Amino acid sequence: MPSYTVTVATGSQWFAGTDDYVYLSLEGTAGCSERHLLDKPFYNDFERGAVDSYDVTVEEDLGEIQLIKIEKRKYWYQDDWYLKYITVKTPVGDYLDFPCYRWITDEKEIVLRDGRAKLPRDDKTQILKQHRRKELETRQKTYRWKEWHPGFPLSIDAHSHSDLPRDIQFDNEKGIDFILNYSKAMENLYVNRFMHMFQSSWSDFADFERIFVRISNTISEYVMQHWKEDFMFGYQFLNGCNPVLIQRCTEIPKKLPVTMDMVECSLERNLTLEEEVKQGNVFIVDYELLDGVDANKTDPCTIQYLAAPICLLYKNLENKIVPIAIQLGQKPGPDNPIFLPSDATYDWLLAKIWVRSSDFHIHQTVTHLLRTHLVSEVFSIAMFRQLPAVHPLFKLLVPHMRFTIAINTKAREQLICECGLFDKANATGGGGHVQMVQKAMKDLTYSSLCFPEEIKAKGMDSKEDIPYYYYRDDGIKVWEAIKSFAEDVIHIYYESDEVVCEDVELQAFIKDIYVYGMRGVKASGFPKMIRTREKLAEYLTVIIFTTSAQHAAVNFGQYDWCSWIPNAPPTMRCPPPTEKGTVTIEQIVESLPDRGRSCWHLGAVWALSQFQDNELFLGMYPDEHFVEKPVKEAMAKFRKNLDEIVNTITERNKNKKLPYYYLSPDRIPNSVAV
């Protein structure tokens, strides 16, 4: 009688094994096998990390194996099992791989197809078409869209992390408990003794070192030493943790009435301000989005303030970007002076601190939360709803969706919810952050997520004119590597543009993102459908780049650039100055966050800057969703390209006092998971 050898691999996560009854049945083109018992209580099979083999004998040859059914029946208590894959050796010696990489919970059963990626058009038999349809029907009931706040991209319909499908939960929920992690961070940083000291001001700038010295690293220590200097202020717009706002100024806006007399001493080329603008030497950062946003009122004992500054910057003869004018409000007038480097030292310093604080708010809520976390969640939900596990694009994208829905759900549960941790230290807490996301949605466009296009739109694409913009340089390299990989995979499965148009699952995926993620807003520029392989490659690059590289660029530098509190104040406790010549050092210190808020801020930026345990970085695909040789060759080529980028960045960073490594592929996690 024909005999099949079945090999079963269990995951290595904690509690991945099972002691329940496990049954297997095979379904082929010529018939089905009986149900075979593989494991039962006290057999000690299917333990964590185990690979177990079994012989399954059948009465007749089953033909080509199409499906495997795995059933788990509870023995005593809930015992979830993480099944990595099953390999079947047929009677004629062929090997078939059936990837799973899912949890089997309660008394559930799952049906697996072999690992060869298939488009809808490739399925010829009714049984495979039905399996594909059933999987999507089940997923669409499980992964439901929900509006968390009006105007936001839609998110997952789950109140808490424990409500999520087991497959997308963190392996260890304690590992992503924000309250626990922030408290642990403050303890590790030796600042927990200050964490309850709200309303207690620091004595002076040196006093901030009491929560800093023991945790210094190369960049954060350099920031502490040089934060007052104009070159450091300007450098952060290029290579800090929010390097996305600066743009070339093509015309001085009327709402910033800067004159030549004001800035003449800052210009170095014997040109007028207008001539400097025409030559491309003037840049601008406008925080208009903060105008009208309500400041945090959750603590009646501390009044907190926001500003919406406009900052004008200049490229000097050393090719350094330095500030030359700052206006702290959007409407010019006698009570909204333009601060200049030639002003009194503390006037100019406080104006720069206000800009840094405003930059922090835009970074946290728009650059980081909206444009990486929330957008990536949209991609994730749409993928699970519209792409079955056998689809090549599911296999391509699923590593880049790992834990994204889980971390966002936990954030809504503890961090950015009403009375959440975000309210403790941030001036945009208490609802201001919600207003910011709602306002920022109008600028969330498809083209703004296309990295090279966005850089060019801001006039920041010339390496010759702006030579030290490492975020741009490294980002372009990573973008091109991802795009090349996406093109290689697409050409394996889509032989023509016509095949792209005919892929109903792909088109449903694209439509879900447009309708639910972008709320059907035509001005977003998100396509409703994809018609060519070229456009599909770009679209997939947007997804993978956003979930990996873009998030890494704006997340993992938070401790480096924000741990020195005066360089990134999460709140200001005095209003912006309305006249010049009155600012004192005492006023600046009183404006900065108190001891309690400083410590919560420090715990936050430390915790957010840490990689996950067992982090998977860009190009690392240990779960073998793809089994075909051409795709594995494309992956190897992708990794080779990424390694070359790592080597280039490492060489450039040698002997630099301020190395830029956030977009080095060996430091870019595959997905948004922190």
Image (tube, rainbow, N blue to C red):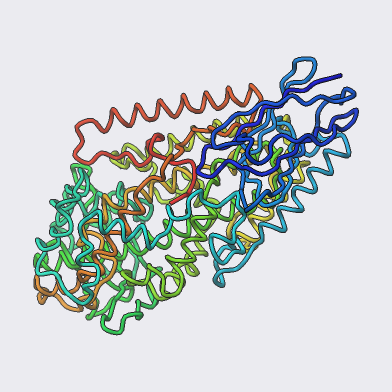
Q: Residue sitting at 29 percent across and 64 percent down? A: 600
* Residue 630 placement, left or right of 171: right
Foreground of the two, 12 or 652: 12
Q: Is residue 494 left or right of residue 184?
A: right
Residue extending farthest to the bottom is 300
Residue 342 locus on image (x, y percent): 11, 63
Q: Is residue 505 left or right of 355 when viewed as pictured? A: right
Q: Position of residue 340 (x, y in %)?
A: 17, 64
Extreme top residue here?
A: 92
Disc tally is 0
The residue drawn where x is 80% and y is 47% is: 133
Residue 163 on image: x %, y %: 59, 61
Q: In what quadrant of the picture does the N terminus appear?
A: top right
Nearest the eye: 518 or 351: 518
Task: Give residue 42's position: percent from left, percent from top.
Answer: 62, 39
State the residue at coordinates (35%, 77%).
295
On the image, which quarter does residue 365 sit in? Answer: bottom left
Q: Can you see residue 413?
A: yes
Residue 324 in sight in this render? no
| Closer to us: 581 or 94 | 94
Q: Residue furthest front?
A: 42
Task: Give 248 or 471, whichever is nearer the viewer.
Answer: 471
